[in-house]
Image: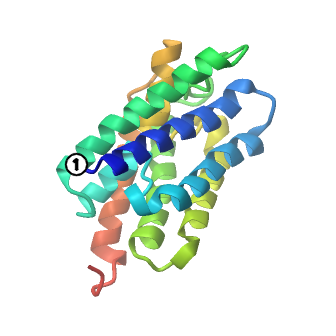
Amino acid sequence: MNTKSLAAEFIGTLALIFFGAGALAIGEGGLIEVGLAHSLVVIGLIYAYGHISGTHINPAVTLGLLIAGEIQIAAAIGYWIVQFLGGIMGAVLLNVLLPDPGDLGVTILREDVSVAQGLVIEIILTFFLVNTIFNTAVSGKAGHFDGLAIGLTLMFCILMGGPLTRASLNPARTLGPAIVSGNYADIWLYFVGPCVGAILAALLYIGVLKDKDEG
């Protein structure tokens, strides 16, 4: 198993939670600032680590790529382990370093959003994120702009979904703050929703959108 890839996925997921969830936990900025914190981390790390691990930093993304045959099961399991560990470590650092960590940016539903609505929102948001990943980074059609496209997609997903579900799109983004804060409210939907969305994006790509001459 590639130690470099595992290290990149661990550090990348840690950074996503530390800076992304951290921006939400601090509470000084609004929705745009929180969205930028998440999307800029993703953009930066895609260019820093994309050539090493692909910069999944999201178990749902890894699942989608596994379904599409873009990663082997052994590598995917390794990615999942370090992604969840990175998410937990990111939340631990926030809890230790922030003067008032609050709820650590835990992903929870707005009071007027039902569980069914939240589940479907997470499915849709993650579908669009993983769809962009397939049609830029995986297909190779976006050249050097794949990181920008993926980061911007995460941004518009957060702008819409943030006020409703806090826009997880990422089981590791949810699990870390949930464990450290002890808040497990509706946590299952933040696993099921992103995984279903990623699988749907993978099936669309391999069944419809993938060029026949792609490897």
Q: Quadrant of residue 51?
A: bottom left
| Residue 212 horizontal/vertical position (percent) | 27, 85
The image shows residue 54 at horizontal and vertical percentages of 41, 59
Q: In this figure, which residue is indicated by the disc labeled 1?
A: 1
The residue closer to the viewer here, 180 or 86, is: 86
Whether residue 103 is visible here, answered yes or no, is: no
| Number of marks in the rendered image | 1
Q: Quadrant of the C terminus?
A: bottom left
> Residue 203 in the image: x percent, y percent?
30, 63
Residue at 68% from the left image edge and 25% from the top image edge: 25
**Residue, x 45% and y 38% (percent of image)?**
119
Q: Is residue 82 left or right of residue 128?
A: left
Question: In the figure, 29 relative to 120: above or below?
Answer: above
Query: In the image, is residue 188 above or below residue 79?
Result: above
Q: Is residue 70 left or right of residue 18?
A: left
Q: Amino acid at mark 1?
A: Met
Asked if residue 29 is positioned above or below residue 213 in the image, the reply reads above
The picture places residue 209, in percent across and down from the top left corner, at: 37, 76
Task: Give the secondary structure at mark 1.
Answer: loop
Residues 76 and 118: in front is 76
Quadrant of the rendered image containing residue 55: bottom left
Q: How has the structure been colored for display?
A: rainbow
Report if residue 139 is visible in the image. yes
Q: Is residue 75 above or below residue 106?
A: below
The 10 Å Cα crowd at callout 1, few under 14, some 14 to 19, many 20 or more, is few
> Which residue is painted at 33% across and 83% down in the image?
211
Q: Which residue sits furthest front?
A: 4
Q: Residue at x 55, y 29 (%)?
A: 107
Outermost residue, bottom side: 213
